[in-house]
Amino acid sequence: MALTLVLAAIATFVAAVIQRITGLGFVLVLVGPIVVLYGPVEGVTIAVLLAVVAAVTAVPFVWRHVEWRRTWWLIWPGLLASPFGVLVVHLLPEPALLLVIAAMAYFALIASRIPALSASLSGRAGAIVAGSAAGFMNAASGLSGPALAAYAVGDRWPQRRFAASVQVIFLAFGIASVALRGLPASPAEDVGVLVAATIAGIAIGTILSRNVSPRIARLAMLAIAWIGATVVLVRGMLALFV
C-alpha cells in the first residue's frame, strides 16, 4: 500500500506541474496511473477530487482572463449530463469500465485534431453539445478536456482566455462529479498526501512555467497520457478475457 501511495503521489505531482504550465492535462496524465493503481471506480473518484483541488489552486492565477458568457454556456449542459456519466459507472462491470476509460482517454488525445469535429462545434449550439459531452465524460472518467478543447478550436476561442476559462469549468464539473460519485473510499491520510502532491505540483509548475516551454510540457503530457491509456486498455482486455 505504501508503494501504491508513493507512485500515485509522483503521478499526481507530475500531472499538477503539467496542468499549471499548459493549462490542461491534469486528469489526462493522471488517469492511466491512478486507474491502474486503484481500479476504475476508486481511481477516477480520486482523480476527480484531485482535479477539483488543482482547479481551486489554479483559478486565482487566471481569474481576470475568464470569459464568463462562453464559460456558462459550457457549464450548464455539462451539469445536466453529469448524472448519466455516473450511471454508466454504476451499470458497467469493472473490465468494461476499464475499456470505456481507455477509449475516453484515446478520444481525449485525438479529439482536438479532428477538423470535422472541431468545425461542427461553434456558437451556442456547439457549446451545448461540447459542454454536455464534457460533463458526461468528467463524471464517468474525469476527462472533460477533449470536448472543451475541440469547441475552443471550432469557435476560435483565444488560447489565453480559453486556458483561464477552462479552469472554472473544470472546477464546476469536478464539484458536480464529487457530489454524484462521493468521496474516495481510500484512507483520509492517503488522500491528504495526494492533495498535498497536487498543491505542490501547482506551486512548482508556477515556478517552472517561467522557464519551461509549454510545448515541452505538452509533449511530456501526451507521451504520459498515451502510455497510461494503453496500460488501462491492456488491463481492461486482460480482465475481460482472463
Image (cartoon, rainbow, N blue to C red):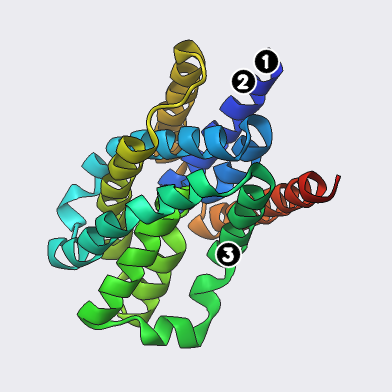
Vertical position of residue 199 compared to residue 159: above or below: above
Residue occupying the point 30% across, 64% down: 162
Horizontally, residue 183 falls left or right of residue 241, namely: left
Percent position of residue 215, x then y: 54, 60
Instruction: Classify mark 2: residues with Cα within 10 Å, few (<14), some (14-19) or many (20+).
Output: some
Q: Which mark is residue 147?
A: none
Residue occupying the point 39% across, 77% down: 153
Percent position of residue 194, x then y: 49, 24
The earlier-in-sequence mark between 2 and 3 is 2
Q: Which residue is mark 3?
A: 109
Q: Which residue is mark 1?
A: 1
Q: Can the viewer see residue 165 in this picture?
A: no
Q: Quarter of the image holding residue 103?
A: bottom right
The earlier-in-sequence mark between 3 and 1 is 1
Residue occupying the point 32% across, 59% down: 81
Vertical position of residue 29 compared to residue 148: above or below: above
